[in-house]
């Protein structure tokens, strides 16, 4: 989402820090996200009182306490509904929605899909650590199959949710993915999310070093990153790998891995990323196998997977309120109360 | 040669198939009755939630009206007159007829098909056997008569038959000595874009009115003189409509835009429907994906500075419980409407009940106090809704407003106020402090009320949430003493609402004596009638009806102790009784009816009399 | 889902009718669905007591009362959770889940997505009439935009849910669509749903002649059907239109309408339907514009859009219970109670 | 030359950083204490939900143990001995030390960094100023000593430091005259696959044990004689673990496979964790997407013939309310566990409270009665869980089982039963009737209990649901009289549970007299102690602790009336008080502590004494 601001006094990241001591575990990926959000808030130049952070419950959902804006740490899974109400009440506020993989996709799943289709203008940051952190380490809807956790000592049985696919299936207008450990990309994605008018769904891979340490290291750590993470840029070919030696092309609507080193095919043969192409976005969403366990898995896409324009619910609502008022005239309380068939007793 | 008989009150039930337009007929007759100055009360009975096949018992739709030259408190227990458009309608309503009542039946609705659909035995026909003995039966071939009357219209029979109900209405107007003009006006507004239909309906209306000229059974007409109603402007209104007006009035009088987040559920749905029509009052309505989202959206809207309201019925209230707890912690205004219906679980969705009182008071985790107010009649929904909003805004708290299906769909004349005479609700918004004094979101006034700090206000940035808060700062606090302090503070805040509500007065009857009839909600009418009846019999009886169920008016205990016995009639298993016993340690007599239907005057009267006989011993 | 049955006494549709009179409005599409389900149940030959119907709340959810099997009319939106529990308790029962567009996609949306990913072996029939019938005509999550209903006198504002896209986004293993008015196709889809092992999601276009009459007539009525409805058959080209004169081909992953009459292109150039191709299924899911309002809209696909095999939750659960029992041995209550550090006081 | 002092009971608190292994130390010492025949009670205090940075006050983890040669009812209000591994640990626990208590501090945990993290002023150091005046302070460089002891181990300092806690434990064992063998055994089982770590820990243990040889402050050792416990087999057990065993026992004894559907929430989560480990008992656990799905999955499992159980804490119970109503209508067995925590809303998730009682009794729409049972101590969770299952199965009803965070995480010795001695729970499954007699799903026995008809059973096909049912057939019915009959029937069914529970007996004290201490849940220990203290002072006092909160034991009223005053101590704002006043119209004195922590013996004792002084007047 995005709202312009008037008279401009440059703000710094620290202007968005509160006096509360941050209570995440040392080393938690949340710290990095907090820092980047504060930095981006300063750049966006919106005044602290013009912004609101709404969260549910979870480690991630502690976020609002640490940002010097308005904030509500609501109840588990319901932040999207609270944020929707707030947007309808005051479309001028900048609203950021903070949720976790449990908060947003388990108990909050219904609000998640309805928020996305209604397209309220706000930024939804889903801190995905593939675990329930706050409740001390049960598997979450995004945990990989057969995961051993406190609640699944013999391995979990659920087929995991694919948040990007679910978001697209919910007709989201902005779908992106980034990671806590690539702060530059994280910052860029936060800016892109804020720039989009509508519900910006940003999945952030976040390391829970206590209960699920290294869940995303294949994608985030030097050693493997370049071969497993595919950074998307609009209009650019899908290239990855150390010294950009690998690419992906489309054979019809079947994606195919290409070894550029082999020399048979060049950049020009590759799939060119088009953020506005829903069909292709739906394919990218399916790059979801784990390269760690499956050598010929496609790399995991990061960046803006899909973006489109669609009216925001609160805008059409306001428009309707205006239109009706135009049409029927500003309501008159006396007329309303009297109705059509009043009579008088004298 | 017809005679004219005077009556002080009459109960008419007009019943037919869902398709027969009984509700329209009823509302037209009601409008006319109101304008002719009678007091009245009406109650529709729709078929249960699913539309049942034509002609079946399940498909019967009825409209009941009680009008008189005296004060009318209820739609009436039994009927003086029944209009039955088909066999099923007769079958369903027969049990509720008074001795010697008049039955006007549409013979054409009693052919073998109709009788079979109404599940009469083969060959059985109530019009021919002795079923209707002792009643004044008026058989009319209403369908035929209507087609006859409309023969010159170029309409199919199906369309012509749609005017059946107007023929009946015409007859009723004649029977009760009413002019035709009013209904003509109603018809004209309703069918202004359908000239032929309009004419056809008028024609049928006239035909009905002039039936008497041809049908010699019609020997008597009746007059019901105007009631002695207070001077003033009146309209007839249904409960949910009055509730809507109360909310909009509160929005106007507080200057807070109204936000209504809801998920459809019988019998609360038409609050959403009604409010959605009033966007030109700045009302925003939101049909959420479920009840939890509905209340959370209202919380978000209130947090953003709107008057956040959510409405539902019992099962939905259960789903909202967790979020109500959040609202209690946030200490922001919020109104939660529960239009009660038969429970438990899905229960009897289309029937009325008062069985959510304990849920409203206690149905949340932790110590989670909220004011609870209840509406006592259709028109009272206006006051009750306004009061709920006032408390929510002025005491910064979620408030539960209880109504029920009987009130929601019932109607009565309402002496409505001038907008200018409705008191303002002033709102306390927080302002940034001077010279760098930090803002304390949970600082309170002497009533323990915090100020409302709306996002977007410069200098008031703060964080709220469902975790226990530190006094003043609102920061998260696990401090033991602070927790107890905050629990007590939230409780005191709610109890202090009692300083801002009027002391309880007697709704009728004597200030002290043998028996206090103590009620709440939709039993108001029957409590009034019964109290008056008992007084007429020379008993010292009083009636108190509670608007505020939490906190109670300060003087309630004193009143209770002024009576030998306390009788609490409820359409539940005795929920207010529990609360009264707990608060005041007094014995109470309970009269409970859990049948999805109102308590009748005579059953309660008999019960009360027995109580007082026992007194004498 | 499918479970075999032992000794075989041929049953008729009427053997699956209860003594309760059906209370739907005359002309309601639910009647047709009821009849076809009873017919299919008879063909499947499972005994009445081996089958259970679980529903939520809604007109459609009255269904169990009319089927002479076991049945539960549960609460609004929760049937998937009840059915999941039942499947875990007794995997031998044939379970049918009956829901509506409001019951299944509005209040029940969260259970919907989690049911599909867990892939419990049951048949989920979603009666989509694009309206709340039981509560007398409010718009539903599948209602088209700007719909005037009891709750939206000035038109609805929500962008509608696309049930097929949402089901695919939830990693459903069987996704199909049919209509109340084409009983042959309806029966066939019911059979296919039952034959699939896993959660079979079948969306049924159902006419609510009272509150939303004709919502699907463009697809269901003779006059327009052939031009607006695309009947999918595995391995067959995508052909539709009066005298099969239109088709669809894929240009890369972009679907293109083809006029076969023009003669330039033939059947062989067309897109061949492959139920197992998720990428293509995701494209088919997007054939969602309304041909009534948009002349060059793609036709609406009916039939099995996607099917794949994936273990069912209840099967892996039972397997785990067995494996653990193998490994640790049948539990001994005395040992369990005593624990590891008991002592005795003599 | 050391002397040996005898003690009847001792309260020790071992506190350090989350990383210091205090919980392990505590559990080892507990195990050893138990085996040495003392009675005991323990309570851990974990840092609040989020892992706080090392060394900070928020990061302090503690373990409290109270053991003695007499009966021990609570973990103790104040400490005789505190082990503080760092500055923060000292700061947090200082307020709870008894006068003259012994403090064993790890000097190495008080460097400037530690002091700063513990938020001591610059330059301030409690070890150097007079903060600890009046205490027996034993300063030890525990970190150094440990490294010293492990110098020959080829381990990094980080790893060596992990054995700090064993050095402390060794010292405690010496201090209380304990053998080393037991703990050696514990260590061996725990580290069987880590030989070096095992050896290092043993070495540290010995070092601690032999500190006395070198440190001359160590003048006295203590003995606490074995308690006179009943003969029998014992184990130490935590509340949630006992609850798990109770459920599994009920499953075995009823022959019904156990299904547990839950959604994680503190402090109920480890019931899910624990049950998930016991798949070899045929237990099926299901982590649902939310609490609503959790209870609905359990309903589905019960409907399918399993023993369906769901567990949660307050906010989750609120979310389950609507589905509980369905279970009440279905009349199938179901157990809903609420491990209560501080409310309202998210409240104080890691703190204990008893504030969901009213929600459990009344938090549903409509007239929706359910039996409610409560556990009163960690080991009692076994009985309570078993009883909840028994009632659910034998009375075909959902049952609420209340525990709380204090019970859930506390531990005590448990004289456990032989499996063979646990009574069977027999189940009544419906069978198809002979010669074509139709099956009536809602036919009942004299206790209003219907039979359980499981899908898959030939000839019993029927439909159930949340709409009101016709008596016997279970078909949907809107009949008014039937509704009242069914509401009353469901109520009677629950009330009749009272015929199958033992009459209430005194938990301690006299049968009648000045004061009855009436409690429920986790206040059991403190009620016991206080009652005994008061008796010792010559007062005529009795203690009754309620297992059954609905229905109450039949004779409860009689007992209440045998006492001059009734004192109800609760960790809430007086919820049981409301219910007792309502049921029995008796005055009650309430003692309420709403601080997320248990009521202490002395505060309650003082309050009770004042009451009785007033008596004398
Ligand atoms: C109604 C309700 N149910 C359950 C909980 C317990 N709970 C708190 S956070 C949480 C899940 C946290 O996981 P996630 O959303 O992934 O956040 P994370 O801690 O991993 O950042 C749960 C189950 C709760 N607070 N409220
Ligand atoms: C908790 C709860 N909320 C709301 C309702 C009211 N309600 C009953 S059915 C229904 C929606 C019905 O629509 P749909 O699921 O599409 O079924 P249909 O009637 O159209 O077949 C609603 C809102 C309810 N019964 N319970
Ligand atoms: S538990 Fe995990 S997610 Fe939570 S604060 Fe600690 S590291 Fe971060
Ligand atoms: S309201 Fe609509 S969906 Fe419901 S029964 Fe009638 S026609 Fe069918
Ligand atoms: Mg997480
Ligand atoms: Mg529908």
Image (cartoon, coloured by chain):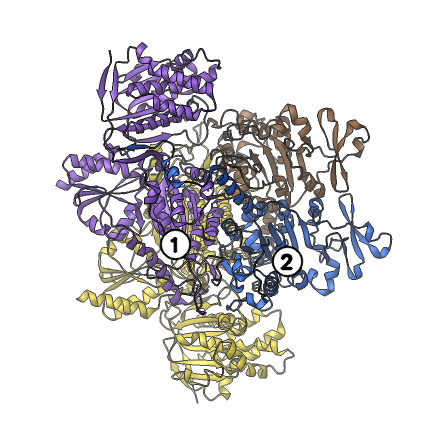
Chain colours: A brown, B yellow, C blue, D purple
Whether pointer 2 and pointer 1 mark residues with C-beta atoms closer than 8 Å, the reply is no
The location of residue D434, given as percent across then percent down, is: 43, 67
Q: Does the residue labelled 1 lie within 8 Å of ligand 2?
A: no
Given the image, what chain letter belongs to the residue carrying mark 2?
C
Question: On the rendered structure, is D442 left or right of B285?
Answer: left
Q: Which of D478 and D398 is in front in this view?
A: D398
Question: On the rendered structure, is B30 left or right of B522?
Answer: right
Q: In which quadrant of the rendered view does residue D510 lie?
A: top left
Which numbered dot is residue D175?
none
Q: Mark 2 points at which residue?
A: C191
Pick the quarter of the image with the C terminus of chain A: bottom left
The location of residue D447, given as percent across then percent down, is: 33, 59
Q: Mark 1 points at which residue?
A: D427
Whether residue B136 can be seen here? yes
What residue lies at 76% left-to-right and 50% top-to-bottom? C272
Given the image, what chain letter belongs to the residue carrying mark 1?
D
Whether residue B249 can be seen here? no
Dot 1, how many residues are within 10 Å of its Cα: few (below 14), some (14-19), or many (20+)? some
What residue lies at 32% left-to-right and 47% top-to-bottom? B499
- Asked if C292 appears above or below B606 in the picture, the reply is above
Question: On the rendered structure, is B518 left or right of D460?
Answer: left
Q: Which of B364 and B20 is in front in this view?
A: B364
Which is closer to the viewer, label 2 or label 1?
A: 1
The location of residue A58, given as percent across then percent down, is: 49, 35
Q: Nearer the viewer, residue C328 or D527?
A: C328
Where disc 1 sits, the SS reads: loop
- Asked if D541 appears above or below A19 in the picture, the reply is below
Both marks 2 and 1 on one chain: no
Where disc 2 sits, the SS reads: helix
Question: On the rendered structure, is C234 left or right of C82?
Answer: right
């Amino acid at each position: 989402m995005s709202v312009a601001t008037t008279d401009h006094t440059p703000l710094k990241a620290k202007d968005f820090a509160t006096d509360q001591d941050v209570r995440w575990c040392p080393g938690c990926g949340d710290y990095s996200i907090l820092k980047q959000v504060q930095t981006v808030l300063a750049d966006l130049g919106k005044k602290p009182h013009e912004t609101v952070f709404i969260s549910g419950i979870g480690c991630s959902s502690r976020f609002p306490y640490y940002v010097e804006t308005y904030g509500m740490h609501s109840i588990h899974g319901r932040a999207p509904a609270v944020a929707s109400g707030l947007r309808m009440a005051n479309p001028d506020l900048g609203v950021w929605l903070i949720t976790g993989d449990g908060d947003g996709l388990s108990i909050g799943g219904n609000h998640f899909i309805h928020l996305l289709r209604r397209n309220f203008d706000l930024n939804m940051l889903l801190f995905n650590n593939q675990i329930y952190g706050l409740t001390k380490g049960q598997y979450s809807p995004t945990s990989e199959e057969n995961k051993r956790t406190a609640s699944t000592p013999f391995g979990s049985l659920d087929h995991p949710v694919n948040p990007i696919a679910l978001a697209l299936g919910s007709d989201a207008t902005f779908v992106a993915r980034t990671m806590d450990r690539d702060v530059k990309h994280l910052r860029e994605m936060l800016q892109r999310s804020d720039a989009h008018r509508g519900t910006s769904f940003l999945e952030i891979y976040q390391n829970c070093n206590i209960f699920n340490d290294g869940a995303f290291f294949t994608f985030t750590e030097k050693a493997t990153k370049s071969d497993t993470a595919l950074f998307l840029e609009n209009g650019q070919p899908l290239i990855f790998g150390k010294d950009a030696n690998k690419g992906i092309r489309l054979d019809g609507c079947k994606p195919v891995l290409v070894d550029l080193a082999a020399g048979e095919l060049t950049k020009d043969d590759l799939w060119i990323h088009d953020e506005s192409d829903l069909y292709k976005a739906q394919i990218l969403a399916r790059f979801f196998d784990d390269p760690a366990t499956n050598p010929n898995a496609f790399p995991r896409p990061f960046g803006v997977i899909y973006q489109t324009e669609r009216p925001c619910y609160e805008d059409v609502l306001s428009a309707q309120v205006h239109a009706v008022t135009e049409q029927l005239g500003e309501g008159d309380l006396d007329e309303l109360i009297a109705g059509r068939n009043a009579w008088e007793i004298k | 040669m017809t005679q004219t008989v005077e009556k002080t009150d009459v109960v008419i039930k007009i019943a037919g198939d869902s398709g027969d337009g009984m509700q329209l007929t009823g509302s037209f007759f009601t409008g006319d009755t109101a304008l002719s100055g009678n007091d009245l009360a009406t109650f529709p009975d729709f078929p249960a939630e699913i539309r049942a096949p034509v002609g079946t018992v399940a498909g019967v739709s009825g409209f009941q009206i009680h009008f008189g030259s005296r004060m009318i408190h209820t739609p009436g227990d039994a009927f003086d007159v029944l209009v039955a458009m088909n066999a099923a309608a007769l079958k369903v309503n027969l049990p509720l007829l008074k001795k010697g009542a008049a039955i006007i039946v549409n013979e054409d609705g009693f052919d073998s098909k109709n009788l079979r659909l109404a599940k009469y035995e083969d060959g059985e026909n109530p019009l021919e056997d002795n079923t209707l003995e002792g009643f004044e039966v008026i058989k009319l071939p209403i369908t035929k008569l209507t087609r006859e009357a409309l023969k010159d219209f170029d309409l199919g029979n199906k369309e012509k038959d749609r005017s059946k109900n107007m023929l009946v209405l015409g007859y009723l107007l004649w029977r009760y000595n009413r002019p035709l003009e009013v209904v003509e006006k109603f018809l004209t507004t309703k069918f202004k874009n359908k000239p032929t239909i309009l004419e056809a309906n008028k024609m049928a209306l006239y035909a009905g009115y002039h039936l008497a000229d041809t049908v010699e059974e019609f020997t008597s007409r009746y007059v019901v003189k105007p009631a002695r109603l207070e001077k003033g402007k009146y309209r007839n209104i249904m409960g949910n409509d009055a509730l809507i007006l109360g909310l909009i009035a509160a929005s106007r009088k507080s200057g807070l835009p109204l936000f209504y987040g809801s998920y459809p559920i019988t019998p609360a749905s038409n609050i959403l429907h009604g409010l959605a029509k009033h966007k030109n009052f700045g009302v925003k309505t939101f049909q959420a994906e479920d009840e939890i989202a509905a209340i959370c959206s209202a919380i978000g809207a209130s947090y953003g500075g709107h008057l956040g309201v959510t409405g539902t019925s019992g099962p939905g209230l259960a789903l909202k419980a967790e979020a109500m707890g959040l609202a209690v912690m946030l200490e922001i205004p919020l109104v939660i409407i529960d239009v009660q219906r038969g429970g438990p679980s899905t229960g009897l969705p289309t029937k009325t009940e008062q069985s959510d009182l304990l849920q409203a008071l206690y149905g949340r985790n932790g110590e989670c106090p909220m004011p609870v107010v209840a509406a006592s009649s259709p028109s009272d929904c206006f006051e009750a809704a306004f009061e709920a909003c006032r408390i929510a805004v002025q005491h910064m708290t979620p408030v539960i407003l209880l109504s029920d299906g009987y009130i929601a769909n019932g109607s009565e004349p309402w002496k409505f106020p001038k907008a200018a005479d409705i008191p303002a609700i002033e709102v306390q918004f927080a302002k940034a402090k001077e010279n760098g004094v930090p803002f304390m979101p949970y600082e309170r006034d002497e009533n323990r009320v915090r100020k409302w700090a709306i996002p977007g206000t410069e200098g008031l940035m703060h964080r709220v949430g469902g975790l226990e808060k530190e006094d003043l700062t609102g920061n998260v606090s696990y401090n033991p003493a602070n927790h107890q302090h905050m629990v007590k503070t939230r409780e005191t805040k709610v109890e202090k609402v009692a300083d801002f509500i009027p002391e309880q007065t007697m709704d009728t009857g004597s200030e002290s004596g043998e028996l206090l009839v103590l009620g709440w909600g939709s039993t108001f009418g029957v409590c009034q009638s019964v109290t008056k009846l008992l007084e007429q019999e020379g008993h010292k009886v009083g009636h108190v009806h509670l608007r505020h169920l939490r906190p109670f008016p300060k003087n309630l205990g004193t009143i209770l102790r002024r009576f030998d016995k306390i009788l609490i009639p409820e359409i539940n298993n005795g929920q207010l009784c529990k609360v009264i016993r707990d608060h005041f340690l007094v014995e109470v007599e309970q009269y409970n009816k859990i049948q999805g239907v109102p308590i009748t005057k005579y059953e309660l009267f008999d019960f009360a009399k027995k109580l007082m006989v026992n007194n004498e011993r």
